Amino acid sequence: MRKKNKRQVFEQVEVVDAGARGKTVAKAPDGRVIFIQNAVPGDVVTVQTTKKRKAYFEGVATHFHHLSDRRTEPKCKHFEVCGGCKWQHMDYESQLYYKQREVENNLKRIGHLDFPEILPILGSEKQFFYRNKMEFSFSNSRWLYAHELEGDTLIEDKNALGLHIPGMWDKVLDLEECHLQADPSDAIRLEIRRFATEKNLPFFNPRTQEGLLRTLMIRTSSTKELMVLIQFAREEAESRELLLDHIANTFPEITSLLYVINTKKNDTLYDQEILCYKGRDHIWETMEGLKFRIDAKSFYQTNSDQAYVLYKLVRELAGLTGKELVYDLYTGTGTIAQFIAGKAKKVIGIEIIPEAVSAARINAEINRIHNTEFVSGDMKKVLDDSIVKKYGIPDLLITDPPREGMHKEVVDQILKMGPAKIVYVSCNSATQARDLALMDEVYEICAVQPVDMFPQTHHVENVVLLKKRKA
């Protein structure tokens, strides 16, 4: 049997840095690192450990002897329980500082790379209410606060509609407010919860796979359009129509009211049929005169304002003259591809999700962009000699992979093709650093620019410009 970790308490510990996954860093008396989940650099705290490993501890601050100058008052009443905004207690200037530090540390410690001075991180003008997409979960067994567990009062309403407690797939925090998505997101969520509870519509239980209501997705756009999608665990036409009719009547501003009947054991939508109950099956987003059709399965940067900042940066670093062949890897619905198409000779977008490729083609047609082509398939299979034979060696390659970065076979093929320039966009500078190290013999880093897409969190986007080394 595995031995239980004996919890230790360390007094008067100074928090000295911010680490990975939003945790902060202190040192134990024996020199080992302590990762703390609820402190800010500059705090002096008492720490109770929750986990002990050979090289480090994990812990929680139980008493604050001195509060850091970097602290600020969190806006949300759910802070510290909800995992949506782990850095709400840190002022925004400090958030940007530590995000930039993370990028620098990953490039140095993971990649062991040489690079020019990192350009100052591009902060977000909106620090709250910046997300255009939120996904909430229903639960018939909500997360209970300590004071609720201590009392003798019987808790009758255990329904929840909110976000999962960090690290707990079966526990959902019932949100009374959320500062991530602008109105009418809160109003829609709260009314759906109220009405469903009043009408005894069963909330889902992921452990027993029982209940009717699974998830709620709300998407907004800069064009003021609104999408709402309810995911049901089974078909109960009378209950489904009762709820959807109420939503439609209460919020007539909804552009696209959708639903899904998902009988699987997970909530993933990509293999499900999306059904339109009222309005259109899509909403529109615009950027610099371009229109993008967004459906329920579309990937679109969740911070629309910062997406524009990011795409302008990519275009600027690309330095296009109008003569270049460009490959855009992990193109999604083709937003970057179309954003830069006016400055390129031809853009080839590659994406694994067929629906995203279909949307990219539709968007290109709507925008009257005729110098793009979109290819569907697994990147490590599609990006081979045959695509080079068909389209040619790219002058510029743009890559924006998922958090796990690029497969080594993809990196190998990029090196084999040898484009003159690469713009690598990443939402995970750790895996980006790993990939850049694999390309370091052939490419030098010419620019590093972090972009803050997600204020109040530890996440940071990073853009790197690579140029082929001279022989």
Image (cartoon, rainbow, N blue to C red):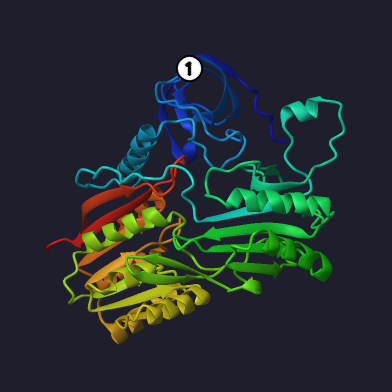
Q: Is residue 1 left or right of residue 67?
A: right
User: Is 418 on the left-hand or right-hand side of 299?
Assistant: left
> Residue 385: x and y, percent?
33, 80
Q: Is residue 95 visible?
A: yes
Q: Quadrant of residue 166?
A: top right
- When the figure is inspected, residue 441 is found, relative to residue 323, above or below; the finding is above
Quadrant in the picture for the C terminus? bottom left
The residue wearing badge 1 is 13
In the image, taking residue 386 as reference, residue 394 lies left or right, namely left
The residue lying toward the viewer, choosing from 292 and 215, is 292
* Residue 55 placement (x, y as % from top left): 49, 30
- Residue 274 visible? The answer is no
Please name the amino acid that badge 1 sits on. Val
Residue at x-position 49% and y-position 30%: 89
Task: Check disc 1: other Cα within 10 Å, few if <14, some if 14-19, many if 20+.
Answer: many
- Furthest residue to the left? 471
**Quadrant the N terminus occupies:** top right
Q: Residue furthest bottom?
A: 390
Location of residue 211 in the rendering, given as x and y in whole percent from the top left corner:
81, 57
**Image vertical order of residue 446 relative to residue 166, above or below:** below
Residue 421: percent from left, percent from top: 22, 65
Observer-nearest residue: 440 or 234?
234
Kindly identify the residue that appears in the image at 44 percent across and 31 percent down: 90
Closest to the observer, 324 or 56: 324
Give SS at disc 1.
strand
